[in-house]
Amino acid sequence: MKKIILFLALLLTSVKAQTPTLSTLQEIQLMKNEFCSVIEVNASWNWNNRIPLEKLENCYTAYIDLSDKNIGALLQKEWDIRVVPTVIIFKNGVEQKRFEANLTMKFSEEEILRKVEAEIKNYGN
């Protein structure tokens, strides 16, 4: 039942062009296993350098806050996050590509969105 509710919430969130912040391992696993998902791993103290993933089409999008004590340290180690923000593209649960910010902990918004869009176009949604 929880999976159905999460799926519907994610679906409705995508329709409204808002990107959710995932806060449980179950939410992260469900999102990661979609046909195409783009997840930005960041930290609340660096939120002003967040990429507006809601501009992306044909792919589920979400944010993960490494400052979250329940999931932050685990994901940082499991996904080998070295800098925030890091944007990771998953296809059916498998990491396809990752983009890491430079030492300033910033991305060029236009450039990263263009690169992510180019990558997900190859998935043939």
Image (cartoon, grey):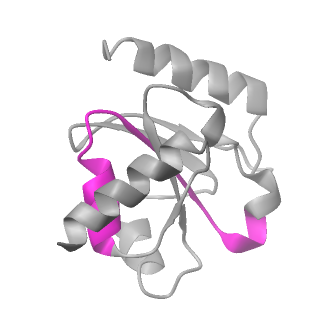
Q: Compared with residue 88, is residue 5 higher up or lower down, i.e. above or below?
A: below
Q: How many marks?
A: 0
Q: Residue furthest bottom?
A: 69
Q: Is residue 40 magenta?
A: yes
Residue 79 is situated, as x and y percent measured from the top left of the image, at 36, 58
Q: Is residue 81 left or right of residue 93?
A: right
Can you tell which quarter of the image residue 2 is in? bottom left
Residue 122 is situated, as x and y percent measured from the top left of the image, at 36, 11
Q: Is residue 124 magenta?
A: no
Q: Compared with residue 22, is residue 7 higher up or lower down, i.e. above or below?
A: above
Q: Compared with residue 100, is residue 84 higher up or lower down, i.e. above or below?
A: below
Q: Residue at x 27, y 42 (%)?
A: 34
Residue 86 is situated, as x and y percent measured from the top left of the image, at 56, 49
- Tell me, yes or no, if residue 39 can be seen here: no
Quadrant containing the C terminus is top left
Q: Residue at x 26, y 60 (%)?
A: 29
Q: Residue at x 78, y 52 (%)?
A: 49
Return the residue nearer the eye: 13 or 27: 13
Quadrant containing the N terminus is bottom left
Can you tell which quarter of the image residue 41 is in? bottom right
- Tell me, yes or no, if residue 111 can be seen here: yes
Q: Residue furthest left?
A: 1
Return the residue nearer the eye: 11 or 73: 11
Residue 70 is situated, as x and y percent measured from the top left of the image, at 42, 86
Q: Residue at x 41, y 59 (%)?
A: 9
Q: Which residues are magenta?
A: 25-46
